[in-house]
Structure formats: C-alpha cells, structure tokens
Amino acid sequence: MSLLSRLQGQNHTDDNLASSSDKRKTGVGRFQELVYKVHREIIKQMGFDYFDDQKERNKIEIEKEVREISESLIEKDAEHLTRSDREEVLQLVLDEVFGFGPITSLLKDEDISEIMVNGPQQVYVEKKGKLERTDIVFRDNDHLYNVIERMISPLGRRIDESVPMVDARLPDGSRINAIIPPLALNGCVLTIRKFSSQLLKIEDLVRNKTLTPQMAKFLEACVKGRLNIIVSGGTGAGKTSTLNIISSFIPQHERIITIEDSAELKLHQEHVISLETRPANINNKGEVTIRELVRNSLRMRPDRIVVGEVRGGEALDMLQAMNTGHDGCLTTGHSNSPRDMLSRLETMVLMAGMDLPVKAIRDQISSAIDIIVHQNRLQDGSRKITHITEVLGMEGDVITLQDIFVFERNGIDERGAVKGRHRATGLKPKCLEKLAAAGMVLPDSFFAP
C-alpha cells in the first residue's frame, strides 16, 4: 500500500476524537491528541500530491522531512514537554506515518508473544506466558479500524461489513486475526500472535524445562525413525513452536512439504516446499482449503508432510497418507489430553462427509498415529510437555495408549511457580524395534522410572 493511502486512511477519522473522560491518560494515551494534531498538520503541509509523486523517493528523506515538521510543531504547541516526552511524541508520529500506529512499539518488542486489542481503549499483551494490560489506547474505533486495514491491505485481504472477519500473516511471520462490528460488540478487535525472530532449538526447550534431555533424545529418534507424530494442546500452549523444533530433526536430504492456514513454520532444511491456504474472494470463489492442499501434496513426491494444524476433514486425508506409505508425517491439533486428541480426530474424520463406522475410523487412527506429544501452558505461564504417549493399537473397540514420559505437578511455590518434575513411567515403548531398524538405538535406561 502506498504511503498516500495509508495517510488518507489515518486522516479519515478527522475530528472524531475519543473523549478525555473515558481515555486512560497515562503513557501513550496522554499524547494521542497532540500526535493526532501533528499528524494532520504534516498532511496539510506536505500534501497528498507530495506522497503520490514521491513513491520511489528514499524513505529516509521522507522521514527526515516528517521529523523536521514534527519537531517544529511540537516546539510551538507543546513547549512545556520534557525532552524525553518530546522524543516519545515524535516517535508516535513516525509510527502513525510509517508504522501501525500505537501498537508499533509492541510489534518490535521481542519479549511480547501476543498482542490483544479489545476495542480502542484496551490493549493487552502476553509476556512470558502472563497477560498484562498496557497503557496504549487508540483515539477511537475508526483509528483502530484504519490500522487493521493498513495491516491487511498489502496482504491482499479485506475487512468490512460484508467480510467482518479476517486471518492473515504479516511479512515477519506474525499471525493476525481481526473482527469488527457488528460481530464484535466492543468495537474492532485485533489479535496478533508474534513469532520470535530467533528460531528456538531443542536446547532452548530443555533449558526452559519444557522437557528433559531424555525426552528430547526420544523425540529426535522418533522423527528420524519416521514415526507419525501429532503435537496436541490448548490455545497458546506452544504447539506450533514445538512442531517447528522437532521438524528440525528431519534429515537434510528429504523433501518436505508444509501445509498451513497461515505460514508460520520456519524449517532450516534446504528442500522445503511451503503451501498456504487461500480464502474465497469477494465473489465467494477461489477458496483453497487445507484438505485440498493435503491431497495435492501426495502428488508432489513428498518424503515428509507437515501440516500446521488439522481442524476439519483434512484429518481423513492425513490419516490415509500416513497409512499409505507416507511415514514420518507431523501435525498439531487442539485437545485437552492425548486421549481427547484421538476423540477429536474421530470427529474431524466424520467432518469429511464420509459415512464411515466408528470402528473403521479408530482402526485408521491407531494404525496411522505413533506418538502423541501433549503440551500445556500452566497457570504460572510456563509451557510444559506433560505427556509423550505412544499409540499401541486396538483392543476391541478402544484405542490403547501408554504414557512414556509425563510431567507430575506438585503444587505451587511461594513465587507462584508450578512445582513438578518430568519422569519416565517405566514402560518400554513398543516402537523401539522400529526405531532400531532405522538405526536409532536408545538404551533401556532412558525409560527407567
């Protein structure tokens, strides 16, 4: 999107400022009216034609001119401000012109993993697994709506009354979801799931006590031994990050195809093909679903298929792929426990529209899935792999499972941190023979209780 259209979008709010009585007058909020005034004056002095004519102009030169005008106006209209406050106002003006308004600083903060904008006057962030309310506010709902439009327009997405919800991915990999009135009663609601610019490694999970070195070694053996693995857990449990990390164990020479709604996986291997779904266009045509991409991937000579998340009928195609020679597939799914993950898979297979008996579905699941890695976000904000569970097969009409590793909780300490430890259950995995045949030999001491 051109700088002109971005500025026009911001100017659209005109004088419809939020009243000072319901605005939090701390931090960023106390400067909003001044920032708005300076921003409008910049547009007035420089003119829309200037930005139209200077599309190829160096951004540094434009920023220099914007900075000069801003400093002059701040000196004239807010001479009582301290030097640090003036710098803050100047930065906020630059964020309005070149960034995404008040939340630009949050997007740059590496410690923040999620940004939740609940209408113009309430912005929360997640830091180290804990929610915190910030002092950031928007002028009004129009201001927030314009920021959302500025984010999604370059991505080929749109949001308005006819399409009041949107999912998209920013260039840095962050995933955004927006929903606007009349569906959202609080005003526009924006949720941004950020991803660290520094890719985590298995050593980071061990250091953060998400799992133990023995568990890490077992998962590495499972991936290299071409077992089919599903990472389960609730929202924000860290499933995608864990999937990304264990995907790094896939050998370099293998051809990997990743399939996602919004491309988040960042695999370091060389031979990776990333596929992403596409929503329907304005005429409700052109939609490409995960299920269609899974089916198409089978014709692309994959060594590995990695599906970001199964949540519908694609589960059937995924299970069929696992059962027809495509070993070593990896995926994630929402559930409360490993057993719940199997129940969800049954439901998702039925969503494919196939009239299959439950026994047949369970047979497919039990023969396709080898390992379930279940991850939870605990009440202290920490993320733990609480179960590594093996799928053994069928006993009658029931799929049998056995836990290989579990996390045992033992209360909460005086700082509010969850106490507990990972331990092996003492059960020897049935898959060890398959791993040994692939050259991955693990000592029995790994599984001693």
Image: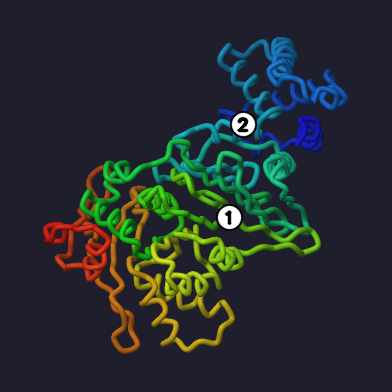
Which label is found at residue 312? none
Q: Nearer the viewer, residue 429 or 162?
A: 429
Q: Residue 232 occupies which quadrant of the picture?
A: bottom left
Numbered mark located on residue 29 in the image:
2
Look at the image and name its color scheme. rainbow
Along the viewing direction, whichever of 382 and 136 lies nearer the viewer = 382
> x, y (%) of residue 254?
43, 53
Q: Is residue 193 above or below residue 24?
A: below
The spot of residue 74 in percent (x, y) is 70, 14
Residue 92: image quadrant is top right
Relative height, residue 41 to residue 252 (above, below):
above
What amino acid type is highlighted by mark number 2? Gly
- 117 or 80: nearer the viewer: 117
Residue 340, percent from left and from top: 39, 72
Residue at 54%, 70% (x, y): give it.
Answer: 314
Residue in the picture at 33% in, 84% down = 398
The residue identified by callout 1 is: 275
Q: Quadrant of the N terminus?
A: top right
391 up-or-down from 439: above or below? below
- SS class, disc 2: helix
Sequence-first disc among 1 and 2: 2
Tell me which residue sits at (24%, 52%) in the image.
217
Residue 151 image-quadrant placement: top right
**Amino acid type, label 1:** Leu
- For the C terminus, the quadrant is bottom left
Query: As drawn, which residue projects farthest toward the right?
Result: 49
